[in-house]
């Protein structure tokens, strides 16, 4: 029940009056409510959810993505989920507790993805074919500036290869590792060149001048 309680081995409440005035103690009851919600999608289970407002609290979403904050005071709160390798939509939400329990609109969780991008400089960049191998495979074509990108990639090891008929790419391919951040792989291109050679047989071959 409402009231004022003290736990201890000795009494701490006043037992007499001082200078003729009695001691009075007022007990104030402050009602509290719950904030609940759900995180759907991969990464919701086990997510850490924080509530910041008149009170600050932390909860962990269960295996179904459900979370709850109990005994929350009236006021406005910012609810924010987090989980390594996961992106939440929206990133946070504002809710208000005003005399009743409150439900937060659902968050959606998705695996965080990254991008491998780069530029192929030189005359062979425009229209070059770029292939991706490794944890995921994909193909794309460099734009007029030699730029290319592969998006939606998970952490892992990849190999990027650039080719174009009549051109030499340096390097011909590159290993790229994504580990919590996007990555870049640039190439240079040059027109492919060849050699023309032969032999002049007979007595006049030695010292002969050849022109092209």
Image: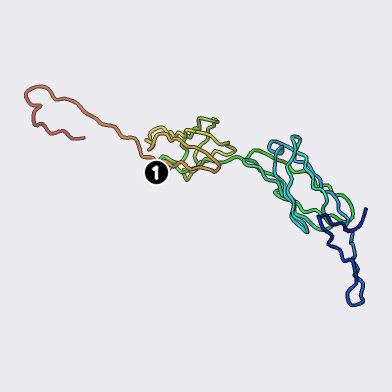
The residue under the point 70% across, 46% down is 81
- The kind of secondary structure element at disc 1 is loop
Left or right of 66 in this view: 207: left
Q: Is residue 101 above or below residue 194?
A: below
Q: Is residue 186 left or right of residue 194?
A: right
> Residue 211 lies in what quarter of the image?
top left
Q: Position of residue 179 (x, y in %)?
A: 53, 39
Query: Eyeballing the image, is 203 above or below 190?
Result: above
Give the residue at mark 1: 122
> Is 89 left, or right, of 202 in this rendering?
right
Q: Residue furthest left?
A: 203
Looking at the picture, tell me which residue is in the foreground, 150 or 198.
150
Percent x, y of residue 101: 87, 49
In front here: 172 or 190?
Answer: 172
Vertical order, 153 against 35 (above or below): above
Image quadrant in which you'd find residue 164: top left
Of 97 and 112, nearer the camera is: 97
Q: Position of residue 185 (x, y in %)?
A: 46, 41
- The residue located at (14%, 25%) in the rendering is 200
Using a 10 Å C-alpha cutoff, classify the residue at mark 1 as few (fewer than 14 neighbours), some (14 to 19) or many (20 or more): some
Quadrant location, the C terminus: top left
- In the rendering, at what x and y percent does residue 189 appear? 39, 40
- Residue at 56% x, 36% y: name it: 155
């Amino acid at each position: 029940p409402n009231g004022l309680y003290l736990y201890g081995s000795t009494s701490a409440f006043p037992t007499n009056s001082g200078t003729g005035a009695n001691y009075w103690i007022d007990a104030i009851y402050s009602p509290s409510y719950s904030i609940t919600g759900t995180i759907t999608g991969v990464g919701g289970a086990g997510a850490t959810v924080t509530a910041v407002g008149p009170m600050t609290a932390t909860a962990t979403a269960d295996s179904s993505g459900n979370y709850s904050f109990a005994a929350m005071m009236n006021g406005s709160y910012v609810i924010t989920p987090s989980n390594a390798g996961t992106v939440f939509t929206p990133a946070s939400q504002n809710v208000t507790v005003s005399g009743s329990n409150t439900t937060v609109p659902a968050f959606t969780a998705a695996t965080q993805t990254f991008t491998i991008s780069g530029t192929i400089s030189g005359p062979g960049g425009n229209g070059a074919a770029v292939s991706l191998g490794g944890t995921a495979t994909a193909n794309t074509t460099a734009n007029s500036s030699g730029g290319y990108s592969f998006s939606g990639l998970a952490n892992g090891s990849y190999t990027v290869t650039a080719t174009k008929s009549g051109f030499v790419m340096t390097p011909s391919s590159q290993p790229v590792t994504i580990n919590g951040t996007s990555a870049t792989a640039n190439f240079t291109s040059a027109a492919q060149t060849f050699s023309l050679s032969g032999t002049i047989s007979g007595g006049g071959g030695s010292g002969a001048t050849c022109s092209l």
